[in-house]
Each structure stands twice: as C-alpha cells, then as structure tokens.
Image (cartoon, rainbow, N blue to C red):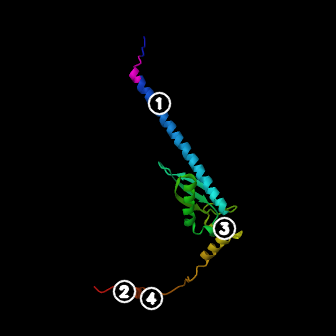
Amino acid sequence: MTVTIAFDLTLLTLVGLNLLGILAYVGTIKLRAHRLARARQRIVETVAAYFSRTGLAVKAEVVSLPDSEHFIVIADTEPLKRLRHSHIVELVLIEEVKKATDFVVERVFWRFPLPAREGAALGAPEQAATVPPSAEAGDAYLAEGLARLRTPEGLEVGEDSWAHFQEAVQLHDDAREAAQPPS
C-alpha cells in the first residue's frame, strides 16, 4: 500500500495566508492589550499625582470600556468632608487626566470603604447597627453624619387615633379639591 501526498501550490498558499492572518490578528490583540495596560497605568499615576498634590490618600483603579479608548476611574478614599462635593473634584480630575495623558475618562466613581471591625461577621445584622470604629477613633466627618442619622431634627413619632387620621385625610382631600380650577 502506497500513500502519495500531493501539495497543491494554490492550497498551500491559502493555508499560509490564513496562518499569517491569524498571527497578525493575535499580534494586534496583544498589542492593543499592552497599550490599554500602559494607558491604565498612566491614568492611575496621574490620578495618584493629582491627589498627592492635594494631600489626599486615594487608591485608584482604572477600567476601560469595551471597544473604546474611554476609561472609568474608581477612586477609594476615606469619607472626608473635603470630598462632600466630589462632582467638582471629578470634573477637575477628568480635565487633569485629559491634559496629562490625552486619554478620555468618562466617569469617576467614588468608594468610601469603612474599615472592618475585628471579629465582625459578614452580614450580621446586630453588628451593622453599631458605630463603626473610625467614628470612635475620631473621624469627625463620619461621626457627624452618624449623629445626624440617629437624631433626625423635627421628626416626632407618636400614636394617634383612627378618627384623627381620617380627619387629616379629609382635610387633605378638601384642600386638593379647592386648589383645582372649576371645569
């Protein structure tokens, strides 16, 4: 039994071109991934430099949107009073990144993680209502917010009769009817 293999020059050329195309495609994908990684790193460095100039300790992550040269910055920082109007900081940060790297940052998302308590179990509801350790340790901004949540101003809760409730509803309905123009 004899096996003969015949190579057709046209078929061999097509296979070679296919292999060359696959190699070029894989190379392009790897080059794009490398460029995106470098771009993310440059944006993280720019964000870190911006916040170090303002005296804030911020840990930043950068995510790229699929099939685009646009990025999203995720900034982790302590809940500070200076960041109360973070939308203004976002606008300045986006312009700073654009000026320094020529990359477009679509959005900046903020995370203000609270430090974990020792011995705290995840999802334990009885421990969720306790004061976080950063408020106990002197974080004035967090303590102020928690105090406001615990004692809302102008809120009074009490019991009332059903007749009083129906009277209040009737007064509300009468006021609404009086406000509507006659048709």
For the residue pair 145 and 18, the one nearer the viewer reads as 18
- Mark 4: which secondary structure? helix
Earlier in the chain: of badge 2 and badge 4, it is 4
The three-letter code of the residue at mark 1 reads: Leu
Determine whether 14 is above or below 116 in the image: above
For the residue pair 134 and 125, the one nearer the viewer reads as 134
Q: How far across and how far down the image is residue 29, in percent?
A: 50, 40
- Mark 1: which secondary structure? helix
Earlier in the chain: of badge 1 and badge 2, it is 1
Check contact, mark 4 vs mark 3: CB within 8 A.
no
According to the image, label 4 marks what residue?
163
The three-letter code of the residue at mark 2 reads: Ala
| Mark 1, other Cα within 10 Å: few <14 / some 14–19 / many ≥20 | few
Residue 13 appears left or right of 46: left
According to the image, label 1 marks what residue?
20
The three-letter code of the residue at mark 3 reads: Pro
- Mark 3: which secondary structure? loop
* Quarter-of-image position of residue 75: bottom right
Earlier in the chain: of badge 1 and badge 3, it is 1
| Mark 4, other Cα within 10 Å: few <14 / some 14–19 / many ≥20 | few
Earlier in the chain: of badge 4 and badge 3, it is 3
According to the image, label 3 marks what residue?
132
| Residue occupying the far top of the picture | 1
Where, quadrant-wise, is the C terminus in this rendering?
bottom left
- Distance from disc 4 to disc 3, alpha carbons, whole Å, reads 43 Å
**What range is drawn magenta here?**
6-11
- Distance from disc 4 to disc 1, alpha carbons, whole Å, reads 85 Å
Q: How far across and how far down the image is residue 167, in percent?
A: 43, 89
Where, quadrant-wise, is the N terminus in this rendering?
top left
The three-letter code of the residue at mark 4 reads: Ala
Check contact, mark 2 vs mark 3: CB within 8 A.
no
